[in-house]
Amino acid sequence: MPVPAKFGLIDKVRAHLELLDPVTWISVFPCLAGGVMASGAMRGTVHDYLLLFVIFLMFGPLGTGFSQSVNDCFDLELDRVNEPSRPIPSGRLSEKEGLLNSIIALLLAIGLGVFLWIHIGGIRGLVILVSILVALFVAYIYSAPPLKLKQNIFASAPAVGFSYGLAPFLSGNALFADIRPEALWLASLNFFMAVALIILNDFKSAEGDKEGGLKSLTVMIGARNTFLVSFMIIDTVFAVLAYLSFSWGFIIPAVFVLIGLVLNMVLQVQLLRDPKGGISFMKGAVEDGFGNAIGKSDVQEHNTFLRFQVANNFLFLLNNLLVAGMVGMKYIQGL
């Protein structure tokens, strides 16, 4: 696509921020918030809010930003096909500038991890440091040869699940308290939810993946079957969350989770019947209300996924935080 020959400082800053993909930063916050709530130990002090901001900065703009930046550096040829408007393939940033972007994000994320390790200390501090170091390493091998985990969905989806779901949830818990047994379960459910959604997200790059030899599930088994596999994982997550809520004595939250499961299944049936045009009643709301936040696509299956994503994320986020909050209340009350 044609681009201006010269760029000013503001244009360069915008391109660097776009390379870090700010839309993805918020994806780790619900898991961090869930972990913090499950700890039942955060106090409304300036100190605690600053710690929460620091860990969000570490996992969000820096950690997630690094994963997006390094992915663009190694996937330049694929992005010329799938996302030619991205900063590097569009010419707004050079490959060298993209590499510098990822290195700075990496070093700053590690620096904050070391700071939290020293400040909190003990096993809790070590959990946070190890979590961010492993997440950054996984983000690198996700895109970089020779491993390049994204080449196969059976490696790429768990990698994303760990970095976006499991690690932030446990780190949020460790920020203020020892790891709660319930938090291990909830973190695991967040891991599997992230796995299910990343499977569907591959719709948008199916054409480039096929040309590049990447084995996404969509390339291997087709759109409808990919929906089916992902929905099975999502429904299992909701069912287990409902069971756990009930077993922990949270009856009302368990009912809400079951309601969320039923609503999700209604939407899923529509998508399975029509992978390209399902949930059409949400089309206007998503494209007009959320289009700039979650993106749009020329791939119809990906657009239907985006409509489903809005509903599913709302239902899971609401129930996940509700149950995490109940866990935290239990520890606050000393039960």
Image (cartoon, grey):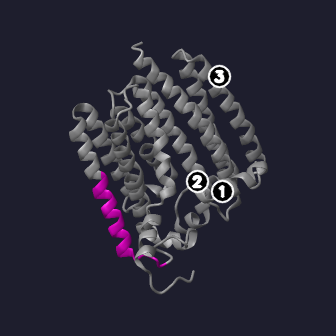
Q: Is residue 46 left or right of residue 214?
A: left
Where residue 185 sits in the image (x, y, percent)? 46, 28
Quick one: label 3 or label 2, which is nearer the N terminus?
2
Task: Say which of marks 3 and 2 sits in front.
Answer: 3
| Label 3: which secondary element | helix
Q: Is residue 119 above or below residue 8?
A: above
User: For residue 55, what is the image quadrant?
Assistant: top left
The region drawn magenta spans 91-109
User: For residue 106, what is the image quadrant?
Assistant: bottom left
Residue ID for mark 1: 302
Mark pair 1, 2: CA separation: 7 Å
Residue ID for mark 2: 201
Q: Residue at x 78, y 46 (%)?
A: 273
Residue lying furthest top: 335
Q: Is residue 210 left or right of residue 268?
A: left
Where residue 17 sits in the image (x, y, percent)? 44, 64
Residue ID for mark 3: 255
Mark pair 3, 1: CA separation: 31 Å
Q: Mark 1 touching mark 2, by CB under 8 A?
A: yes
Specify the amino acid type for callout 1.
Answer: His
Specify the amino acid type for callout 2.
Answer: Asn
- How many residues crowd around disc 2 within 10 Å: few (fewer than 14), some, or many (20 or more)? some
Quick one: label 1 or label 2, which is nearer the N terminus?
2
| Label 1: which secondary element | helix
Mark pair 3, 2: CA separation: 29 Å
